[in-house]
Image: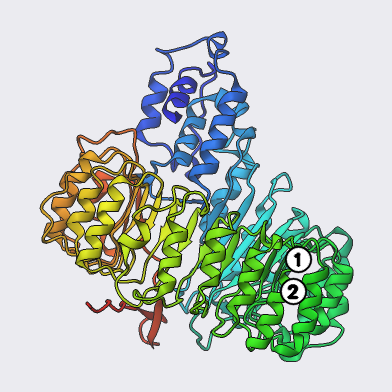
Amino acid sequence: MFSFVYSLFSNNVSNEPINNNEDDEYEDDYSDDSINDSKNKISENQVSTKENRLFPNYLIITILNMILSNQYRNGIEIEHDSSEKSDLFNQILKLTLVSKTFQNQIIPHLHFPMFILRGSKDITYVQRLIKRGITPSGKNPFININQINIDLPNECRMIELNSTINVFKYLLLFGEDLHLEKLKISTALVPRDIDSEITRILVEFILKHQIKELELHNIPAIKTHNFIENKSILNYSLLSNRVNICGIQHLCLKNQLLSCDTVMDLIELIPKLHILDLTNNRIGLDYKECFTNVIGNANLLTVLKLSSNVLKDNVSQLLPTLKSSCFQLHTLDISENYITNESTKSINDFIQSNKIIQSLNLSGNSFTELGVNSIFSSLVQNNSITDLSLSNYQTFNTTLFAEYLSSNSSNKLKSLNLSNSKILCPSNLIFQSLSINFKSIKSLDLSYCSINNDDSQLNQLSEYLNSNDNCKLERLKLLKTFKDSIPCKMLFSNLSKSITDLDISLNYLNNENSIDFSTILETNKSIRSLNLTSTNIRNLSALFNSLKLNSTLLFLNLSNNAINLQDIYDYEFLIVNKSLISLNLSNNSIENREMTQFFRILSKNRSIKYLDISENHLGGDIVFPTFKRRNQKLSLDIKVSPFLKNNLSLNKMSKNIIVDQNKPYSITRYDTNNEGYITLQKKTPNKRMAY
């Protein structure tokens, strides 16, 4: 589709030449051979404006916005290396250089969902796009950017203490015409001597652009004498004189370890809050009774997340205030707060009287069986909840919970999380309720619930999952649910046609059950996403053969299975299968020779667009075959370990090389003689032992 757009506009260019005389590093980034070739064809292929009216600009804009929204839902990362500029965003930049029509009539109406900025160079780069567009003389800059993510990495040089400060100074360069709604800053290390200038810059930026959504995430990190983790990078008191012009409606402050006093001051400074996420802070450690009044004044709240704040039984004061003041609150998360039975009365009153609440998370608290049972009784009197999480409870009365599932109050329930809970008993009432009365649920999580293969509960679960009339599930999670190998034939032989997402990772698939599951997969027409991570799958050949006949599976995850491909001689599924678009083979034991053979057959595949081969036993000198037969219109993103980033044959095969940087790191030493570097060592994942 974009190739058509490119050909359309590259041939319909104003006679006005593009000024290339100005020495601009910003424009030079895109002055590659493809652009020069396009410019040379302009004089030979002029198309009238009337001709282009067959394809109105609004239609082109709509199509491009749909493509941008879909392809960059996780953000646009800036690539400064010209050899890597092959993605859609950079093609748009190139087209802007060769077509004045595209620059003036299309660019101002394109919406970019998110930019990910990892340093001052990235910020300067985007700032220029916003200020003047791709060319120095551009009059139609890129101003429709919905979100900017500033992602400061976990690896730092101790000698560059001012680098963090410089990153934020560049924020002031963004013009007021930027249509920005959301700012997210993820940082692991903050300079201990952070000055007030950074906090001032952030406040000015927030107010200048009327940011509606602000997310500040502190990532757990290492500590040194120059850097400190979990320190707030924003001085909220600077907002005190600007309350009337602060437009923040969505505030996320995860992992900030903020005290109760700080949170109260902050909420008072932002009166228009609709969504507040305070997950993993310290509100409960120095809890003040006036906190409830402050929350009550934020009467526009629709979402409140207070997970992991050590609130304990202070929620008994908070919930009545939420009930009487926050009339629009539909999502409440008070999980992992050590709440005991003393607070069950206020929780029950809140559940029974609230007719708006839709999502409720009470997981991981300190209720006894008596407390949990009383909550079940109150659920029967609430018919508004659609998302319920009750994970990490080892003792409760399944009869009472089954009554809730069987009642009319559960008719709207669409998502149920019972992971790591002791939901099983001889009566099997829960699974009977699911099978007979419960048709509305779309998502079910029974992970870590420890079902025995010889248990009678297994029959009830099987009956429910194989009932097309009563089971309307779309997403099913069964992570580490079975003590023995998964009884695939019993559970999935006639799996409900509504289930599209199946996750059975962290279980065990022996040879017999692997063959059974592969046989089932051959004829299954519903599953789109399948996660087999850490299943130690025994018969991979049978699984690959099933993919020759399966025509619906889109995403397959086989990571962390000690796969070596040594005994796999038939990769015909790569040629025959036309549906699979994502294959994850990371964290296995695949070696150079096996991977070379795999890629030789993969070159004939026309559907796979994403391949993860990171964390395998691959050497940097591996020679990958070129994809001469592959349809050039399809892109192939390959995720690799860092040492394969510059592999020549791999780069020739696919320019969309994704380096796996999201692995945990641990500090090993601090060497003052080594130019002040922090030495980091990658943690090696533990291989799962064979059964």
Residue sitting at x 57%, y 65%: 433
Q: Name the spot of residue 259 as percent of width and height, x first.
A: 73, 84
Q: Name the spot of residue 206 as percent of width and height, x first.
A: 74, 60
Q: Indicate whether 415 appears above or below 403.
A: above
Tell me the SS state at disc 1.
loop
Q: Which of 645 and 339 is in front in this view?
A: 339
Binning the other alpha carbons within 10 Å of mark 2 as few (below 14), some (14 to 19) or many (20 upward) gives: some
Residue 410 appears left or right of 623: right
Tell me the SS state at disc 2.
helix
Binning the other alpha carbons within 10 Å of mark 1 as few (below 14), some (14 to 19) or many (20 upward) gives: many
Residue 62 appears left or right of 306: left
The amino acid type found where label 2 is placed reads Ser
Residue sitting at x 61%, y 57%: 414
Disc 2 to disc 1, C-alpha distance: 7 Å
**Residue 173 visible in rendering:** yes
Residue 680's label in the rendered image is none
Residue 63 appears left or right of 147: left
Q: Indicate whether 180 appears above or below 57.
A: below
Count of numbered labels shown in the rendering:
2
The amino acid type found where label 1 is placed reads Asn
Q: Residue furthest front?
A: 427
Q: Name the residue under label 1.
A: 382
Q: Which of 113 and 456 is in front in this view?
A: 456
Q: Does the CB distance between marks 2 and 1 fall below 8 Å?
A: yes
**Residue 238 visible in rendering:** no
Q: Name the spot of residue 146 as percent of width and height, x first.
A: 64, 48
Residue 80 appears left or right of 49: left
Residue sitting at x 30%, y 38%: 578
Q: Quadrant of the N terminus?
A: top left
Q: Mark 2 points at which residue?
A: 378
Q: Nearer the viewer, residue 688 or 225?
A: 688
